[in-house]
Amino acid sequence: MRTNVFDRLAMAIAVTGVIVLFALPLLCPGVLVPLLPGVHSRSPFCSKWKAMRDQRVLLRQWADAGAIARVSHLVRRESGLALWATPYGEYWIPASDDKILPILLAQEKRDIYGGEDWGVRAGDTVLDCGAYVGTWARQSLDRGAKLVVEIEPSPDSVECIRRNLAKEIAGGRVIIVAKGIWDSEGALRLFINPDNAAGNSFVENEDSGKAVTIPVTTVDKLASELRLSRVDFIKADIKGATERLLRGGKEVIARDRPRLAFSTEELVDYAGGVAARAKSIQPGYEMKCGPCFLSGKDIITDVLFFR
């Protein structure tokens, strides 16, 4: 009798184990991250366990992007650009980037560059480095930013900003700077990503087969030329050039202690180096690591925040 009881108990435990084995990845999708072979962190702020927890953020973003895509539609194409109607308004984008817009809008829905505590606040003067087509600028203006400077090197994206934010430009709330951000003034080759203009880079994609020469400037020079008495917030998604931005923005960062939100998803934007350089310029900074995501077999920090 006792043997039968133990047999049934062992069977129940085995069945429960199988159920958990198959159900747990569905209930907690990131649970497999610590178990995957060859996975290692490229960020000193990201562990496998944090990446496991943060996988939910990424899955929620994918779901939101899919939902946005399903209710968006193409209005028309014109001169290499495409106008899309979305739940968040109409946006011109480069014609090859149809799949990118829903992802960007989903990122902004989750406040990728910070909410009330770490993000843009009413009255802020904002530098949007790597502005793409101006989606995040519109969100910043909706949250009360006084001025957003759109810094974007890609010619097609600059034209999209002019169209997307025409009213705000005319009203003096948006300024476009059609340049890249670097640690010195000059001109550099911008390597073109043929499938995603948001991925154009001065540092990456050298084998893309296409490049254009674009002027570059520094945060310090730009703030001086625009006569910005204060900079309150700097957002950067500049594909490998973040430490260059910091080197060329030392005076503004030391003077104003602006809040910073830096995309560090590119492997060349090493989160540890970015953090060390930011704190060397402004030792008083408090830092926060955003979500940690698995990219291939690398765990990366999505965004670093400073205030």
Image (spheres, rainbow, N blue to C red):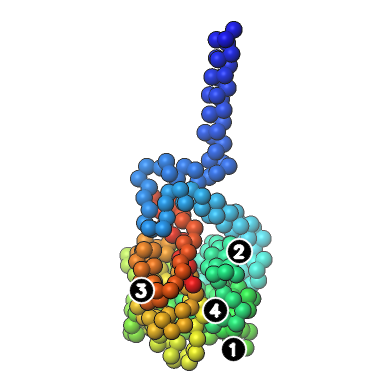
- Is there a contact, CB below 8 Å, between mark 4 and mark 2? no
In three-dimensional space, the C-alpha distance between marks 3 and 1, rounded to whole angstroms, equals: 34 Å
Residue 84 at x, y = what percent?
A: 61, 69
Residue position for label 2: 109
- The circle drawn on residue 182 is none
Q: Residue at x 60, y 70 (%)?
A: 116
Mark 2 is surrounded, within 10 Å at the Cα level, by few (under 14), some (14 to 19) or many (20 or more) other residues, namely few
Circles 3 and 1: CB distance less than 8 Å? no
**Mark 1 or 2, nearer chain start:** 2
For residue 161, the mark is: 4
- Examine the rendering and report whether any part of residue 130 can be seen: no
Quadrant of the image containing the N terminus: top right
Q: Nearer the viewer, residue 182 or 143?
A: 143
One can see residue 8 in this view: yes
Q: Amino acid at mark 2?
A: Lys
Front tag of 3 and 1: 3
- Disc 4 + disc 3, Cβ < 8 Å: no
The residue tagged 1 is 172
